[in-house]
Image (tube, rainbow, N blue to C red):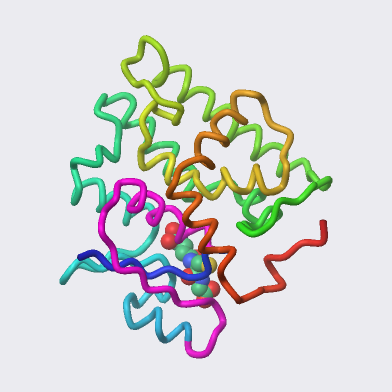
C-alpha cells in the first residue's frame, strides 16, 4: 500500500498533484495529512523525508519527495495508468511542460496562491502574472493542437487527450485560474471545466471544504 503525506487540501498545490493522479486512477493509498503550522508539523513531515516538505510518497522501503519525482515514480510503478503519453514526441513534450511547471511561473505562484475553498472576483492582474497566464494558455493550446483531439488518436478533453501526469502537474493552476476568475479563452475554459469535473478534483475540493484550519496568508479579501 502506498502512503502519501500531504498538508492542507485548501492550500497545498504541491500535494494536489500526486494525490489527484493517484485518486483519478483509483490507486489505493493511505493518506497522512499534516496540517501546516499546527504543533510539531515540521518534525512530523521530517519523520518521512529529510527535506521536510510535502508531498512525500512512501512505498515500502522507497521514499520519494518532490511532486514531479513522485509522479515519475508513479508512472513507472503503475504502468497501467499510462501516466505519460505513449507517443515519444508527445511524451517528451508532456515532460517538458511538466518540468516548466515545476520550476517556473513564479508570479502566478506568488500573486495567486491556491485556495480551494474560494472563488474570487479578482481584479489585480500585474503584468508579470498576465505573462505567466499567457504562457500557460499558449502551452495548453499547443498541446491540444499537436497531441490531442480528432485525428490524433488521443480522444479526451485533457492536454494530451487522455489524462496524464502533465494534467496532474497543472491541476493547481487549473484551480488558480478558476479560483481567481481569470479572463481566459474559450478553449482554456473548456479545459478548466474538464479538469474541475474530474471526480478526483471534486473529492479534493470537498476535503478542502471540510478542513478546519484557516491560514491568513492564503486568504484574500475579494
Ligand atoms: N518542490 C516541492 C515543493 C514542496 C513544498 O514546498 N511543499 C510545501 C507545501 S505547502 C511544504 O511542505 N511546506 C512546509 C513548510 O513550509 O514548512 C515539490 O514539488 O514537492
> Magenta includes 77?
no
At horizontal 34% and vertical 21% (from top left) the residue drawn is 154
Instruction: Give the total of numbered labels.
Output: 0
Q: Which residues are magenta?
A: 12-40
At horizontal 48% and vertical 83% (from top left) the residue drawn is 41
- Residue 89 at what x, y percent from top left? 31, 24
Using the image, determine if residue 128 lies above or below residue 38. above
* Quarter of the rendering containing residue 79: top left
At horizontal 37% and vertical 70% (from top left) the residue drawn is 5
Using the image, determine if residue 68 lies above or below residue 87. below
- Residue 221 at what x, y percent from top left? 82, 61
**Which quadrant would the N terminus be assigned to in this image?**
bottom left
**Which quadrant would the C terminus be assigned to in this image?**
bottom right
- Residue 107 at what x, y percent from top left? 67, 50
Residue placed most toward the observer, 124 or 2: 2
Using the image, determine if residue 98 lies above or below residue 18. above
* Quarter of the rendering containing residue 127: top right
Amino acid at each position: 500500500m502506498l502512503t502519501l503525506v500531504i498538508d492542507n487540501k485548501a492550500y497545498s498545490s504541491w500535494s494536489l498533484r500526486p494525490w489527484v493522479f493517484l485518486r483519478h486512477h483509483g490507486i489505493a493509498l493511505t493518506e497522512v495529512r499534516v496540517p501546516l503550522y499546527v504543533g510539531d508539523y515540521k518534525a512530523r513531515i521530517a519523520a518521512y523525508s529529510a527535506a521536510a516538505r510535502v508531498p512525500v510518497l512512501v512505498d515500502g522501503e522507497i521514499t520519494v519527495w518532490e511532486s514531479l519525482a513522485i509522479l515519475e515514480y508513479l508512472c513507472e510503478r503503475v504502468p497501467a495508468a499510462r501516466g505519460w503519453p505513449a507517443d515519444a514526441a508527445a511524451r517528451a513534450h508532456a515532460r517538458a511542460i511538466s518540468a516548466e511547471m515545476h520550476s517556473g511561473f513564479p508570479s502566478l505562484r506568488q500573486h495567486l496562491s491556491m485556495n480551494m475553498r474560494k472563488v474570487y472576483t479578482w481584479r489585480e492582474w500585474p503584468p508579470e502574472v498576465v505573462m505567466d497566464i499567457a504562457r500557460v494558455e499558449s502551452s495548453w493550446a499547443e498541446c491540444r493542437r499537436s497531441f490531442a483531439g480528432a485525428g490524433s488518436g488521443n480522444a479526451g478533453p485533457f492536454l494530451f487527450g487522455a489524462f496524464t501526469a502533465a494534467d496532474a502537474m497543472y491541476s493547481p493552476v487549473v484551480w488558480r485560474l478558476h479560483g481567481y476568475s481569470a479572463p481566459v479563452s474559450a478553449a482554456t475554459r473548456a479545459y478548466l471545466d474538464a479538469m474541475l469535473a474530474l471526480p478526483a478534483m471534486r473529492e479534493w475540493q470537498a476535503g478542502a471544504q471540510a478542513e478546519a484550519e484557516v491560514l491568513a496568508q492564503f486568504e484574500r479579501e475579494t
